[in-house]
Amino acid sequence: MKTIFVLTCIVAVALAKNLPNLPENERVKLAQVHQSCQSDPKTYCDESKLRNLVNNIDDPVVGTHMMCMAVKAGLMKSNGDFDLGTMKNKISLVINDQSKVDGLVKKCSHKTDNLGKTANLMWVCFVQNDIQYYHKL
């Protein structure tokens, strides 16, 4: 009986490591945002491109989808400005060392002359800095 309990705990920990460090309600919200963006033909994007975001930063279709995601998640406004307060709150949900949050907000909130690319770069920055504010595709 002890062996089964220990094995169950090991499996649970291993599975948890593969999930984002994000509260379930936020993960569900992001999945709903993604589905909403995917259901609109104007913001639909092939999932394989989204899974390989780093190599598709300049793809306008990916940018349109990621901008939709950023706006509906509250991280950006439709004019391309970042909502720094919301961004800080969302990053705070998944970063254990709160002293790093302001620096990460600053690092991931750089505007370009292209709204889609700005959104893509923000999401890539999240991934590269282990800001696990995402759902699993």
Image (cartoon, rainbow, N blue to C red):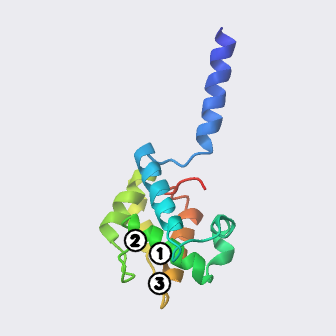
Percent from the top left, x then y, of residue 36? Answer: 46, 63
Quadrant location of the N terminus? top right
Q: Mark 2 Cα within 10 Å, few/some/many (few <14, many 20+)?
A: some
Identify the residue under disc 2. Answer: 71
Secondary structure at badge 1 equals helix
Residue that label 3 marks:
115
**In the rendered structure, which amino acid carries the disc numbered 1?**
Met
Determine the CA span between mark 2 and mark 3: 11 Å
Residue 90 x/y as whole percent: 39, 58
Inspect this view and state whether residue 99 appears. no
x 65%, y 77%: residue: 56
Residue that label 1 marks: 67
Q: Are marks 1 and 3 in contact (CB under 8 Å)?
A: yes
Please tell me the numbered disc located at residue 1. Answer: none
The residue at the far bottom in this view is 113
Is the residue 116 above or below the residue 95 in the image?
A: below
Q: Residue, x 40% and y 71% (percent of image)? A: 71
- The quadrant of the picture occupied by the C terminus is bottom right
Q: Are marks 2 and 1 in contact (CB under 8 Å)?
A: yes
Which residue shows up at 50% across the image and 47% down it?
Answer: 21
Q: Is residue 32 left or right of residue 53?
A: left
Q: First in sequence: mark 1 or mark 3? A: 1
User: Residue at 64% across / 23% down in the picture?
Assistant: 8
Q: What residue type is labelled 3?
A: Leu
Q: Which three-letter amino acid code belongs to the residue tagged 2? A: Val
Compute the Cα span from label 1 to label 3: 7 Å
Q: Residue 7: percent from the left, percent from the top?
A: 68, 22
